[in-house]
Image (cartoon, coloured by chain):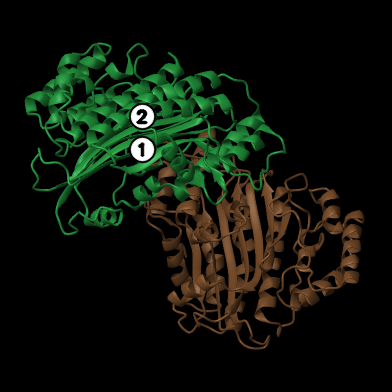
Chain colours: A green, B brown
Amino acid sequence: MLSALSLAARAAPRRAGPTAPAALRAYSSSTSRNHNQQQQQDEQQQHRQARSELYRIDFDRAFALLAVSALAGFGAAQYAFDNFGRAPVECEAVNPLQRIKGNAPMSTRMEALVKKIQSDMTSALEELEGPSGGRFLHDSWTRKEGGFGTSCVLQDGRVFEKAGVSISIISSPAPKTMLAHMRARNREGLDPNGDYKMFVAGVSMVVHPHNPMAPTFHANYRYFELRKSDAKETDPPAAAWFGGGCDLTPCYLFEEDAVHFHKVIKDACDKHDKSYYPRFKEWCDNYFNNTHRGERRGVGGIFFDDLEDKSPEQLYAFVSDCGNSLVKQYIPIVRKRMNMPYTQAQKEWQQLRRGRYVEFNLVHDRGTKFGLATPGVRIESVFMSLPLTARWQYNHTPAPGSPEEKLLNVLKTPREWV
Amino acid sequence: MLSALSLAARAAPRRAGPTAPAALRAYSSSTSRNHNQQQQQDEQQQHRQARSELYRIDFDRAFALLAVSALAGFGAAQYAFDNFGRAPVECEAVNPLQRIKGNAPMSTRMEALVKKIQSDMTSALEELEGPSGGRFLHDSWTRKEGGFGTSCVLQDGRVFEKAGVSISIISSPAPKTMLAHMRARNREGLDPNGDYKMFVAGVSMVVHPHNPMAPTFHANYRYFELRKSDAKETDPPAAAWFGGGCDLTPCYLFEEDAVHFHKVIKDACDKHDKSYYPRFKEWCDNYFNNTHRGERRGVGGIFFDDLEDKSPEQLYAFVSDCGNSLVKQYIPIVRKRMNMPYTQAQKEWQQLRRGRYVEFNLVHDRGTKFGLATPGVRIESVFMSLPLTARWQYNHTPAPGSPEEKLLNVLKTPREWV
């Protein structure tokens, strides 16, 4: 169905006005669900108004709508955009976090959290791009089995070669194959023949700057929940866990950057469990590993999965602190490096390192494998993490003692940074 | 061990003189095995002479040496180069085919055949590069478990962005895991606990031209043989089969090119079995398939594996005809396209298609997977097929009716070309 809203959105200019804060520019129509026809019309009216009045829209009303729709449950989006896998539409995630009460279901709070993280990071990156720089295109989609998402992509900007920050909120029956997979991962309590519904809320980002001195950055935080199909809203889920992490991939090693990156995330971890940072730092080094080259992808960060060793409340607090640290972790580093001078040879070395990034994502990354094995997957979302450009040069070996070799040495033998 | 020969080779200029035919330039020291010290010294003398006298070397003597060493068995090369994974060395495969008798063992004849194919193709590609164009670097290696090879790589030439033509001659004990794998592939006759030695001779090539109108080309022909470790030289092998194929990957579709490419290989197939071309053409379409995008890699060609439906003699004749057709299949096409004018947008489309090529090779290709799973593999040889540069652009969709869309339509629905 081609809604009036999506038509209006297409007619809108793709680049948002430089004066509008990203979080306040508009609201995502795809997050408004289970509302009636009148509400739909209101939203469309608001959207048009937002565009025509330089984004001065009625935010209280927008937030109220979003809070209502976010709390209303996790059915499929009421109207599907016809732009699935097509040209981007202008519709933006907002931050309804402040409207979510502490006693709201975890799924609701995680949905709000991933939207906030998306909004904060896209705003921070656009700020670095500056008034005349690149802007994120917002590509919203719905999934017919239940769920929706927004991929924000900035391509060939002033500072960034490619940056993608996407969220997915999936709510649908859990496939039986997934149950078998979950049981194999120490969740034997699940009934292999039972009917479950799953909920996933996740945010994922990969940022590739132009300047070879500025590192690539990746982060991903997610929440997964399984419930019996006939469970009541107030019943605890049959299983629930958190996963995620962040890692930094420089082409040239500035040790102070690696220290800063690790220090910020260690501080976030230590507030919740002193064992988290060392465990998750090692997990990250082992996970982002181009085993076929004997090289880690970068200088690491943290990585964890299937985390359920504390109460959901405690883990939510931990993941919130991680997610809310991302801007502080990365932005100061790229600000420091993005205008440094560099040579053509250094650019080519960056392109070779981009090739290694592609190798990891296509050969080893579990998320990519899972995506490629999922029928009907939106391949552009799976491959959003790939750099705009990459290079493979036969048998390239850095000169002994060069900065390029210095990086390789750290990739071969990960270091403790804090 | 750093031999005097490899030192001499390093001291030689990397680019061969334009007047020396590639097949006659020098001979590969790594193919000379099981000879005595005097012979080694003779070879070294010859090699130096070849360099100093503009490649006018004593070919009769060289061929005789090669024929002797090729017939002498398949032990490890007598001296290992220290350049494994390092800078290329100048040492070239030659064509000893004319010296191999018809009653020589199949392994000997296949070794000679793959060397001939390598020599013919590198000569033909260098001829297109012209006197001032790029030249192949020859990177020879030995494998401590038994075997050797030469990777010929031309990078950033006048016509070709990257071209790799490599041969491997492997002769070593067969790992038990491989036996299990073979038994699972309809070779139940093999004793799972038996001691076998394997022999593999293969040639593999991937050619990426600069000009987006000139298609990428890939081919690979190989012979595999298993023998009981205690078998006599004259015993027939416990198992032996052939595999290979060729395929064409255009960025812009010129139907006459696809027709020519398929016609040449169909003619070669039809001489041996009228059912081969249609069967192997379909196999190719199904194999070189980016299933995650619903796109074939290119306009196909042929593909076959585990071929043992005729006598080894008959299959050798078939594979010889295929291998000897490669130059005729590809060179006229690239000659016709390599100087066509093109725009920056067309170049970017080519780069996107290069990205798809990387996706196939890293995600789907069995050869790459096998390579990555092999301990101690020479990763630069596995990844030689990757283009020099590639691009991933979020959600790129060609305009309706454009030449880019025309190509995509053929990739989505393979055609019969002859």
On-image quarter of the N terminus of chain B: bottom right
Asked whether residue B353 is in view, the answer is no
Could you tell me which residue is drawn at 91 percent across and 70 percent down? Answer: B38
Q: Residue furthest front?
A: A274
Q: Mark 1: which amino acid? A: Gly
Q: Mark 2: which amino acid? A: Cys
SS category of the residue bearing label 1: strand
Which of the 4 quarters of the picture holds residue A28?
top left
Q: Which mark is residue A244?
A: 1
Residue closer to the observer: B172 or A33: B172
Contact, CB < 8 Å: mark 2 with mark 1? yes
SS category of the residue bearing label 2: helix
* Residue density around tag 1, few if under 14, some if 14–19, many if 20 or more, within 10 Å: many
The numbered mark 1 sits on a residue in which chain? A
Which residue, given by chain and number where applicable, does mark 2 sit on?
A322
Measuring from the top left, give residue B159's x and y in whole percent. Answer: 66, 46
